[in-house]
Structure formats: C-alpha cells, structure tokens
Image (cartoon, helix red, strand yellow):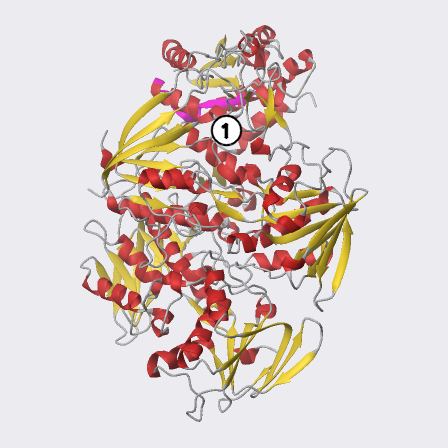
C-alpha cells in the first residue's frame, strides 16, 4: 500500500461521498469509513431537497451506487477508527470493522430475513417513529441494501435462545452468526473528516412541549413523515398514524439560544416542508412562526416568497424566549408575543420544531483520537489565522461538511471539493 | 463471423425464479420465429452478478464466441456496469450487450406468474431485437493540457491560482484592472472568522507574485476561447497596449466577482453627493485610507443610521454578507468613539455562520439600537422607516450607511456567451447542479467561483476557489489522457442541409458550423449524447451512437407488439 496514493475519508454523507468519488477518479485508493450500516448520511433522510423540490433519492442514489461499484473505493460500513499514528503523508490507521453477521457479497437485499425476526427495537434512524427488528435495514432503499444484526438484541448472538429464523428465511446463505469483528490496519497519506451533524434533543427546549405533548414533532421527524420511504410512506399523520392534522405551525429557531448560533438551513427547509405538507394534505392550514429569516442564497428568497404567497402564513414573534405551549383535548395552544409585543395565541394540531443542529455525537471522541482541535461549539476547528479553510489543527487532516459547522448541501459539497484540492496537493509526488 | 446471440436469464435467487417461469422463457426464446436463422445460446444462472456468475458469463462469451449478449436480470442501475466489465474481460465490445430488467419491471410488480413470464419474454425479445442493431463503439484517448486559465484577480481568483499552480501545472491569472486583489483589498478589517488581519490578502498577492508557476496578466481581458476540457485555445488582449497573447490551457476558472448595486437605482433612495449618505464600501475605503469615518464637513458623526437590505426586494434575494459587515462597521464606529449613536435598521438579521451570532452579540453589547423595520425611505439625510408595528418614524442622523444588494457584474453575460455557460434568472452564473455540483457549469472544464455565482463572503469565495481547484486537480492529471464519452452524436454529412437548428438546441456548445462544407459538425470531445440535436434535425441526419433510430425502433416495436 502506497500511502501517498491512499486517502481515508471518515463519514459517508454527501461531503464524504463527493470527496471519495473525486479522489477515486484521480486514481487514489479511498477507504470510506462509516459507522452506520448504510452510506448516504443525513441527506438521504430527506424526501426532497430545496429549492427545486427534487427527489433526494434520485439525486443521491446514483452517487451511492457509484461509490459502491467503484473499484478504487473500499467502503467500510459498521466501522470506526480506533487508532492513528504517523503524520501527514503517511498515517497508520487502525479501523475496527464490526461484524454485520450478514455476508455483503452473498446478500441480495431481498428482505426475507427481517419479517421473521421475533425481536423489535425502536428505529432511531427513523427518528423512533417506527420499530425495527434485531436484523434490519434502516429504511427501504438503504445502500448497501444488506441488513445488519444487532448483536445485543439478537436472541442467538446474545445467548438467550438458539433462534435460527432469519437464517432459515435467507435463501442465499448470507446470514453468518460466526462473523467476527476485524481490525484493519491501513496506511493513508491524508484524512478527510466528514462526520456530519446531529440535532439537539428537543426535550431540552423547555418551553416548546416536545416529549410532553404528542402533537409536537421535530422537523427531522416531519422529514421522515413526508418521505415516501418513511414510516407513513409519505403521508402526513399525527402520532397515531391515522389522524390528519388540520392546522400545523412551524416554529423556527427552536433551540437556537441554547446552541448560540443560527443553524443555517432551517428557514429554507421549512419552506419546503410547508410546500409538501400542503401538497399531501391540501386542506391543511400552515403557519410559520419566526423571528429572523435566514435565506443566504440566490435561490432561497424566491422559494420563500412563493410559499408565503399561497402555502403558509408567516407570523413574526418578537421574543422567542416568551413562547409557551399548552395542550388541552389534543389541541396545542401557542402563546407568543406578536410584532406589537402583545401576548397572543394560536391553536394548532401539530407543531414542528426546527431543532438546532449540533456537532455529531461521535465528534469529540474522534477529534481526541485524531488529535485535532474542536471549537467552543464542538465542531471541528479550522485555523483562526486562515480564511475559508478546510485544514484542521493537524497537518494532513482536513474537514468538510457539517463536521465544521451547520451548512446546506452545496456548502458541504464545496468544502469536500476544497478538501480534495488540499489532499491532491499534499500527496503530489 | 455470423451473429451468435447469448441470452442469459438470471434467477436472482428466488427474486426472479419464484415470480416468473424461467423454463418457459428459455423454451419460448429458443423457438422464436424471427430468430430462426440466428444462432442462439439461451441459458439460466442462479446469480449472474456473483463472483461465480461473472466467471461463468465470461467463460460462456469466450467458449461460444458470442457476438451479442443479452442479460435478463435486474435494473441497469444495479448491474449494467458489472456486465459491461465482464464483456470487456471476455473480449466482447461492451456496446454489443443489453441488460433487460425482468426483476423490477416483471417479477417484482406482477403477481400473476403467467403474466409476469409473458412480459419478461416480450421484453427479452425486444432486447434481442435491439442488440442485433447495436454497433461496437471504441473509446478514444485525448491528450490534455493541465494548465489553467483563471479569470479575475480578486480573492477567489488568487486562491484558485495558489491552490493550482505547481511544477506540473501553470496558471495564467488574468485581471482586467491594473492591480490584483479585487474589492477585498479596500477593507480595513475582515470579519473575525476571516482571519485576524487584512494583510491576509496582501500576503496572498505577494505569494502569487513570487510563484514561478503563476503568470499574471493585469489590464488584460479574455478575448477569444475555443475548445473543451483538456484543450482550450485562448486569446488574451492587453488593454493598455492592445497586444494579444495566445495560450493553451486545459480548464478555465471564472472568478470575475460582483458589483454593488447603486442604491439610487432603487425606489426610496434619493440623495446627492453632498449628503452624508454612503455605501458600506465607501465607508470601508474611507476608513482604510484615513483611519477615520467622518462627515463631508470633516467632523466625526454623532448619530449614524445603518440600513440593511437595500434593494433586496427588487433583486429578489438576500445578499448574505450585509448584516455581518454592518456589524463590523458598527465596530469601527464604536472604535472611533463609543459616544457615536448607532441606529441599526434591519429587516431580517441573517447570521448564517456559526461564529456570526456571537460576534453580533459582542458588538451589539457596545450599544447599538437595533430596530426591526419593514420599509425605509432616504431623502438626503432624512430617513423615514416603517417599524414592524406599522408606525412611521423620521430621523435625521448625520450619517447614513447603506448596504446595497450585491448584483452580478456587467460582464457576466459576455462570459456566459463566450464560454457557453448558463446564467441564472438573477444574472449570476448557473451551477451545473445547484445542490451537488456547485462550481461546475454545463461546459466541462469551465468552473465558476466566488460572488459571480451568487452573493458570498470572503471565506465562501475561498472555499469555492479551492473547490474548483479540487475539480481541476482530479480531472486534469498531468500526463494522463482524457477519455471522452463514446455515446455521442454524429452528423451524416450527405443528409445535412445546413439549417443550423442543432446549433440552437445544443446546451453544451458541442456543435459548430463548417462554413466551407455548409454542414454542422459535432465536436465529440464536448458532446454528452443528450440527443437534443437528433430531435431537432429536419433531415434526420443526426444520430446518437448507441441510441440510433433503428436500435430504439426495434426495441420499442417488439416491446409494444402485444399492446
């Protein structure tokens, strides 16, 4: 293995995928490490993307396929970095590849194994709106389209029963309970960190009722409700899966004060959410309650204008901290201060919180391992003395996408492409 | 060599085999009346995409000396490239093979096994008809030039040049004015996230000047350019002495910047040169040059009104950077004297980067009266604003600072035409794809970076400049050939009437008109095989390889026979 020809990319979201494909086309060997069983990151959770309302799957699935079929890219799912030594130009890296218990090259993704599994668990990828089995794929269309077995819950693997059901259901002999975790040792000349983002726990926002009232959803839950491969197959429903909401309010900047920054994408995706809620349920009445609109792109204002015209009523609230939610008989009452700073209220069935973006949960441990600095918000730090940089505090390690801070898809792609430029120059012979 | 067609039906485990009757497929295909005089090999396999399946297929192609191959299996999205690779390994031209999808289009969507089988037979039959009309296509290899032309010597162009230039790659950096640096050299300070001092830009200019692989052309413009990714022929014109320079480059990075709108072009902004009304850039220049922000009288201002979003409604977009730089100007003012009263008239506070809010809060704490408004009128030094509660207030501050919209530079249209790239409705350049391909354009090898593709700040412009460099560094590798698309259009000279319809519909600028011969000609290195020209040609003289009329007709005819 020639380290000057090998690059490690951590995280397989839109930034990690873009970087991997570019590097592979330039003849680099790429190790693309992903901690989840599927690649694609957060972008595949969205049904459509703004501002053109394009189907996200149609946008991203070809990229995912290209990644999986690319001979220069070794995709390591259910994997994480455990050790790193060396320096820019020649890092020695240990990667822990956990057992999937399903043979990727034998499995066809026919889906016969999981219906028979007797164990259920919440599907956190689906924002816990549905359950999954101990053997599962996160959603229809997961790529690679190969299930994974959760060893803690699988009756056979955790030693509680000699359960064989998935193995019997599989016609390709793909289930392999004997699979063991492996440690891969690789050398790579450069590393790109593209581990994406998480959102804050909406229950931490005391005044907005999430977790207390079932009618309060996060925008990321709504995303899955609107997605055709989501738990309701794209139907807009309350938590019982049946009731249609009559009035919906989108609350902007939920948790912004807590994190101390604007999450950059919420105003834009909310316009898209309003559009699709209206398209799916034409009788629904939508309100957007906001304080400042952030639409920093030539494409976004027009989308917002169109939504304001016909789809959603935009309401200004003068002090987000004063907002309170009450529930009675399943109806939610929003108390807020209007532009005159007078206390008013609005009754709705469903409340959507555009919860703030925060650094990915894994970022602190990873930064520690890579010996790179994080900033006071917890995102990967770029040098204070450099403008518009994708460098981290350690030479040869670069950052792109939301690992560096909240940003939209094009900005993530741009950083990935910029990181590739740095890698190409670093590894020049 | 006579035709010998191999037809291989994949069972895909139970996915296909349990839903269609493969034995019947094999039987009926082998007995097809219209293939009576052709040699057929019709077989099944349990999983063609598996390692064993691919080896089997390769062996079959070789042993049977197949001239054509039809695989009846899954979606081309899953395994088209898999079987193409097998063809290549077995020595069969990959364009002599066809994948028929009997899984997603038959097995998985029709519950009646008989009907699913009928449809599968029909589709495979159609594929067999098509494959007979397919022709072998050969990939070409073209030499490519790794050097890069960067147009625009502002911060984005400088960054692109610095990221690209090296011992294997020259950069030609072209700037129409006499100096490098663009607008950002006029700024006294940069935002905190943009580095700690404004020398950053001067330092970068110095780096450019001492880099032996960057050739700088000032007071120079792009005059002519023809070619394609890897091979552009360029003529530059020096505006001082009118001399011309001819160059060759493999890619072009456009970093041509933006302009500030003139507030007086928008409704409600009436003032003259004598009034103490300034644009933010004028203030930046004044502060940089004199270290003071003063009135026309030479005195320091007592009360300053900052107006956000000037012209936002008219241009139809947010200019992204104004809220931030007005905060920076507030900081300048408070630095000059903490006594200066600042009234900040904003509509939406747009603070999209992670450090922006903290910066805003820090400066606001120095004492700024923030006023959320819905409209503003400026008449000389008199300013009337409408608050969000609808009430109008008139003030007469001694200084008004306006943040006008960032608008496209006047020469965007010129470059769009010259380089055959598209403009967005706002007049900024249009990306190849707004989400997933933001610095590429619809012309391969031409990239757009910085504020010419939409309002953006310095950090964004730099990231974009590096992004375009990343594209170039991975697409044009010194010494490596480029392989253009083979499924491209060709024009049959004998039939072309020279009507030039095709020139109008080609979005990639791949067709040119040969005046001497009076016909259109496709540049195969640029063509992407979209087929627009085929549809526009009244004499039927254009065909797209691998999607010719007979190929499509034969396939469709058979697929629809029983409909």
Question: On screen, A5 above or below B50?
Answer: below
> Please, what secondary structure does the residue beneath circle 1 have?
loop
**Residue at point 62%, 26% (across, down):** A131
Vertical position of residue B309 compared to residue B540: above or below = below
Q: What is the x, y in percent for residue A113?
A: 57, 15
Could you tell whether B246 is left or right of B68 in the image? left
Going by the picture, which residue comes out furthest to the front?
A: A206
Q: Is residue A77 left or right of residue B21?
A: left
Above or below, B76 relative to A354: above
Q: Is residue B93 magenta?
A: yes
Q: Identify the residue under disc 1.
A: A143
Q: Quadrant of the N terminus of chain A?
A: top left
Farthest residue to the right: give it: A329
Along the line of sight, the residue nearer the viewer: B73 or B87: B73
Towards the viewer: A26 or B32: A26
Q: Is residue B234 left or right of residue B118?
A: left
The answer to whether residue A141 shows anywhere in this view is: yes
First to last magenta residue range: B90-101
Quadrant in which residue B478 is drawn: top left
Q: Choose top left, top right, bottom left or bottom right for residue B448.
A: bottom left
Where is residue B144? Give x, y as percent. Answer: 28, 45
Asked whether B466 or B486 is in front, the reply is B466
Quadrant in the rendering for residue B26? top right
Q: Indicate the quadrant containing the C terminus of chain A: top left, top right, bottom left or bottom right.
A: top left
Q: Is residue A159 left or right of residue A84?
A: right
Task: Give the class, few, some or many, for how many residues have Cα within 10 Å of label 1's Cα (few <14, many ≥20).
Answer: some
The location of residue A424, given as percent across then percent down, is 28, 44
Q: Position of residue B485 (x, y in %)?
A: 40, 38
Picture residue at 41% right of the left edge, 92% below the top? B298
State which chain disc 1 sits on. Answer: A
């Amino acid at each position: 293995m020639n380290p000057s020809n090998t690059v490690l990319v951590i995280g397989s979201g839109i930034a990690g995928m873009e970087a991997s494909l570019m590097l592979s086309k330039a003849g680099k060997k790429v190790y693309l490490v992903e901690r989840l069983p599927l690649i694609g990151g957060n972008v595949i959770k969205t049904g459509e993307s703004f501002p053109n309302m394009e189907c996200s799957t149609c946008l991203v699935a070809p990229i995912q396929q290209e990644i999986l079929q690319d001979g220069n890219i070794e995709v390591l799912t259910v994997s994480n970095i455990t050790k790193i030594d060396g320096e820019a130009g020649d890092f020695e890296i240990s990667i822990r590849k956990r057992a999937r218990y399903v043979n990727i090259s034998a499995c066809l993704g026919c889906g016969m194994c999981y219906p028979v599994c007797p164990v259920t668990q919440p599907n956190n990828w689906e924002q816990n709106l549905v359950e999954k089995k101990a053997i599962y794929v996160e959603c229809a269309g997961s790529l690679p389209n190969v299930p994974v077995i959760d060893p803690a819950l699988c009756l056979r693997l955790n030693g509680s029963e000699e359960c064989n059901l998935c193995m019997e259901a599989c016609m390709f002999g793909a289930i392999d309970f004997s699979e063991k975790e492996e440690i891969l040792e690789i050398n790579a000349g450069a590393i790109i960190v593209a581990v994406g983002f998480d959102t804050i726990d909406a229950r931490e926002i005391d005044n907005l009722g999430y977790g207390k009232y079932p009618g309060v959803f996060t925008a990321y839950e709504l995303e899955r409700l609107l997605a055709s491969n989501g738990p309701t197959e794209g139907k807009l429903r309350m938590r019982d899966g049946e009731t249609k909401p009559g009035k919906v309010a989108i609350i902007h900047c939920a948790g912004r004060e807590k994190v101390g920054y604007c999450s950059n994408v919420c105003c834009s995706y909310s316009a898209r959410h309003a559009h699709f809620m209206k398209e799916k349920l034409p009788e629904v009445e939508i309100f957007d309650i906001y304080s400042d609109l952030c639409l920093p792109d030539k494409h976004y204002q027009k989308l917002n204008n169109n939504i304001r015209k016909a789809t959603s009523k935009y309401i200004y609230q003068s002090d987000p901290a004063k907002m309170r939610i009450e529930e009675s008989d399943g109806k939610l009452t929003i108390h807020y201060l209007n532009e005159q700073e007078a206390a008013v209220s609005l009754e709705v069935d469903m409340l959507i919180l555009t919860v703030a973006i925060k650094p990915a949960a894994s970022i602190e441990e990873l930064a520690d391992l890579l010996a790179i600095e994080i900033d006071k918000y917890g995102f990967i730090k770029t040098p204070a003395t450099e403008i518009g940089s994708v460098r981290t505090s350690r030479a040869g390690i670069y950052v792109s996408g939301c690992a560096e801070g909240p940003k939209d898809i094009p900005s993530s792609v741009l950083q990935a492409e910029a990181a590739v430029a740095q890698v190409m120059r670093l590894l020049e012979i | 060599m006579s035709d010998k067609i191999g037809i291989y039906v994949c069972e895909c485990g139970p996915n296909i085999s349990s839903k269609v009757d493969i034995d019947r497929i094999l039987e009926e295909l082998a007995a097809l009346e219209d293939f009576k005089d052709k040699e057929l090999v019709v077989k099944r396999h349990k999983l063609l995409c598996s390692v064993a399946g691919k080896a089997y297929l390769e062996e079959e192609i070789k042993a049977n000396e197949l001239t054509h191959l039809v695989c009846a299996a899954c979606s081309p999205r899953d395994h088209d490239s898999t079987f193409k690779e097998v063809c290549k390994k077995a020595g069969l031209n990959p364009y002599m093979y066809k994948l028929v999808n009997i899984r997603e289009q038959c097995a998985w969507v029709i519950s009646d096994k008989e009907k699913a089988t009928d449809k599968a037979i029909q589709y495979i039959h159609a594929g067999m008809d098509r494959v007979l009309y397919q022709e072998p296509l050969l990939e070409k290899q073209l030499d490519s030039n790794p050097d890069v032309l960067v147009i625009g010597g502002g911060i984005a162009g400088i960054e692109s040049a610095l990221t690209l230039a090296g011992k294997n790659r020259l950069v030609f950096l072209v700037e129409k004015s006499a100096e490098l640096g663009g607008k950002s050299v006029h700024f006294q300070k940069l935002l905190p996230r943009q580095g700690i001092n404004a020398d950053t830009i001067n330092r970068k200019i110095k780096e450019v000047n001492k880099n032996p692989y960057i050739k700088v052309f000032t007071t120079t413009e792009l005059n002519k350019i023809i070619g394609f990714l890897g091979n552009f022929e360029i003529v530059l014109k020096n505006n001082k002495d009118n001399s011309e320079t001819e160059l060759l480059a493999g890619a072009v990075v456009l970093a041509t910047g933006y302009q500030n709108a003139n507030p007086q072009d928008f409704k409600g902004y009436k003032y003259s040169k004598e009034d103490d009304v300034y644009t933010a850039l004028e203030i930046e220049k004044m502060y940089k040059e004199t270290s003071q922000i003063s009135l026309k009288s030479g005195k320091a201002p007592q009360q300053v009104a900052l107006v956000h979003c000037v012209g936002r409604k008219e241009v139809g977009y947010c200019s992204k950077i104004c809220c931030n730089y007005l905060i920076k100007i507030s900081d300048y003012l408070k630095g000059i004297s903490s006594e200066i009263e600042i009234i900040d008239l904003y509509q939406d506070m747009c603070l999209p980067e992670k450090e922006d809010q903290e910066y805003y809060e820090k400066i606001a704490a120095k004492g700024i009266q923030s006023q959320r408004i819905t409209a503003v009128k400026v008449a000389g030094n008199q300013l009337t604003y409408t608050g969000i509660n609808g009430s109008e207030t008139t003030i007469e501050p001694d200084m008004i600072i306006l943040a006008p919209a960032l608008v496209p530079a006047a020469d965007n249209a010129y470059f769009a035409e010259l380089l055959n790239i598209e403009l967005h409705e706002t007049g900024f350049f249009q990306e190849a794809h707004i989400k997933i391909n933001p610095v590429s354009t619809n012309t391969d090898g031409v990239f757009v970076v910085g504020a010419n593709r939409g309002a953006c700040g310095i950090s964004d412009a730099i990231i974009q400049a590096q992004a375009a460099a990343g594209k170039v560094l991975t697409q044009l590798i010194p010494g490596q050939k480029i392989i253009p698309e083979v499924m491209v259009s060709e024009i049959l000279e004998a039939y072309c009437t020279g009507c030039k319809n095709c020139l109008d519909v080609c979005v990639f600028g791949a067709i040119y008109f040969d005046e001497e011969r009076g016909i259109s000609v496709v540049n195969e290195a640029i063509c992407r095989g979209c087929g627009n020209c085929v549809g526009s040609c009244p004499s039927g003289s254009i065909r797209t390889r691998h999607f010719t009329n007979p190929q499509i007709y034969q396939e469709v005819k058979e697929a629809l026979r029983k409909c």
